[in-house]
Amino acid sequence: MYAVIKTGGKQYRVTEGDALQVEKLAGAAGDPIQFDDVLLVGGGDVVKVGKPLVGGAAVKAEIISQDRGDKIIVFKMRRRKNYRRKQGHRQAYTRVKIIGIKS
């Protein structure tokens, strides 16, 4: 069985046992979490497509860790104007493991 969930402005296709990295969610490592924005549930011959969400469907997950991504450098420059701005950024994300899918 698989599902398509929406979190952090993105959509993910998940199955039971998957580990994925999503935008930062509140909670500590080991905390359970539930995704209620389920767009599609499928398995075998039956596929439920939501309009826009599937009613009563939910995906249960567990937070594995709260991490930050690699550093990226944002550099702005205007030639011949002595304008230079350098800024670093590390995006925060949450790694979750999918425990179950309820359709």
Image: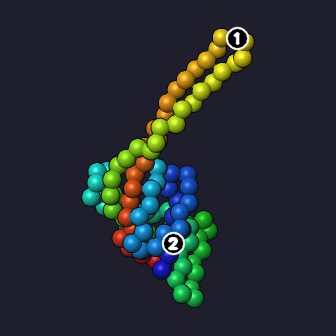
Label annotation for residue 49: none
Question: Which of the marked residues, 1 or 2, is nearer the chain's N terminus?
Answer: 2
Q: Are marks 1 and 2 in contact (CB under 8 Å)?
A: no
Q: Which of 40 and 80 is in front in this view?
A: 80
The amino acid pointed to by label 2 is Ala
Q: Where is residue 99 in the image (x, y as percent from the top left)?
A: 36, 70
Q: Classify mark 1: residues with Cα within 10 Å, few (<14), some (14-19) or many (20+).
A: few
* Mark 1 lies on residue: 81
* Mark 2 lies on residue: 3
Badge nearest the viewer, 1 or 2:
1
- The total of numbered circles placed on residues is 2
Relative to 31, does residue 90 appear above or below in the rendering?
above
Q: Can residue 54 be seen in this view?
A: no
Q: Classify mark 2: residues with Cα within 10 Å, few (<14), some (14-19) or many (20+).
A: many
The amino acid pointed to by label 1 is Lys
Relative to 60, does residue 84 appear above or below in the rendering?
above
Q: Quadrant of residue 36?
A: bottom left
Kindly state the secondary structure of the residue where label 1 is placed.
loop
Q: Is residue 17 visible?
A: yes
Kindly state the secondary structure of the residue where label 2 is placed.
strand
Q: Which of 68 and 27 is in front in this view?
A: 68
Q: Nearer the viewer, residue 65 or 39?
A: 65
Query: For the point 50% across and 75% down, which residue is it?
Result: 2
Query: For the point 58% across and 20% down, which residue is it?
Result: 85
Residue sitting at the far front: 80
Residue sitting at the far right: 80
Q: Quadrant of residue 52?
A: bottom right
Residue sitting at the far bottom: 45
Query: For the point 66% across and 21% down, which residue is it?
Result: 77
Q: Distance between the residues labelled 1 and 2?
A: 52 Å
Q: Where is residue 58 in the image (x, y as percent from the top left)?
A: 43, 69
